[in-house]
């Protein structure tokens, strides 16, 4: 996409098929590793929010894993969907690091079922 200045955000759907938490995290690890290797920088993880509406164990496990990956420097940053907007510091930080994310359809939608990840 020459002249565009912004590659599309890649999607990883770890809730598809309603896997157990361990399977979902295994898929997340594999997909992030693959995307990092091929040079993708922006990823949207679809983890759902849990059918009970109380937080979703896949979502919580994904955030724990991403926190650890950020701490050890394997990812640049991540932002929970509910914070991915102009009124949250975490959302503004994501735009600072990757301004093209403003064009993402989930920007400002407070979508608890996704997390945006910036790879190194």
Image: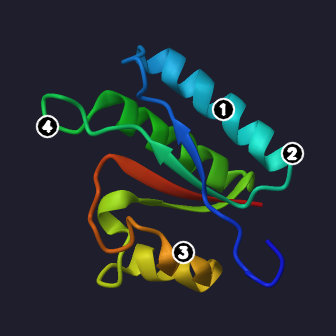
Quick one: label 3 or label 4, which is nearer the N terminus? Answer: 4
Crowding around mark 4 (Cα neighbors within 10 Å: few <14, some 14 to 19, many 20+) is few
Please tell me in which quadrant of the rendered image residue 49 appears.
top left
Quick one: label 4 or label 1, which is nearer the N terminus? Answer: 1
Q: Residue at x 47, y 38 (%)?
A: 62
Question: Disc 4, disc 2: CB below 8 Å?
Answer: no
Quick one: label 1 or label 2, which is nearer the N terminus? Answer: 1
User: SS for tag 3?
Assistant: helix
Residue where numbered disc 3 is placed: 101
Quick one: label 3 or label 1, which is nearer the N terminus? Answer: 1
Q: Residue at x 29, y 83 (%)?
A: 87
Quadrant the C terminus occupies:
bottom right
Q: Residue at x 74, y 56 (%)?
A: 73
Crowding around mark 1 (Cα neighbors within 10 Å: few <14, some 14 to 19, many 20+) is some
Residue where numbered disc 1 is placed: 29
User: SS for tag 1?
Assistant: helix
Q: Residue at x 41, y 28 (%)?
A: 15
- How far is mark 3 from mark 1, CA to CA? 22 Å
- How far is mark 2 from mark 3, CA to CA? 21 Å
Q: Is residue 66 above or below residue 39?
A: above
User: SS for tag 2?
Assistant: helix
Residue where numbered disc 4 is placed: 53
- How far is mark 4 from mark 1, CA to CA? 25 Å
Q: Nearer the viewer, mark 3 or mark 1?
A: 3
Crowding around mark 3 (Cα neighbors within 10 Å: few <14, some 14 to 19, many 20+) is many
Residue 84 or residue 11, whichever sits in front: 11
- How far is mark 1 from mark 2, CA to CA? 12 Å
Q: Position of residue 88 (x, y in %)?
A: 33, 78
Residue 37's disc number = 2
């Amino acid at each position: 996409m020459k002249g565009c200045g912004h590659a599309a955000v890649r999607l990883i759907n770890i809730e598809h098929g309603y896997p157990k938490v361990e399977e979902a995290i295994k898929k997340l690890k594999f997909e992030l590793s693959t995307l990092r290797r091929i040079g993708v920088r922006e990823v949207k993880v679809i983890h759902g929010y849990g059918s009970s509406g109380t937080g979703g164990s896949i979502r919580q496990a994904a955030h724990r894993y991403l926190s650890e990956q950020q701490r050890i420097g394997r990812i640049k940053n991540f932002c929970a969907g509910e914070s991915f907007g102009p009124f949250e510091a975490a959302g503004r930080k994501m735009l600072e690091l990757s301004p093209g994310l403003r064009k993402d359809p989930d920007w400002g939608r407070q979508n608890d079922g996704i997390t945006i990840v910036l790879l190194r």
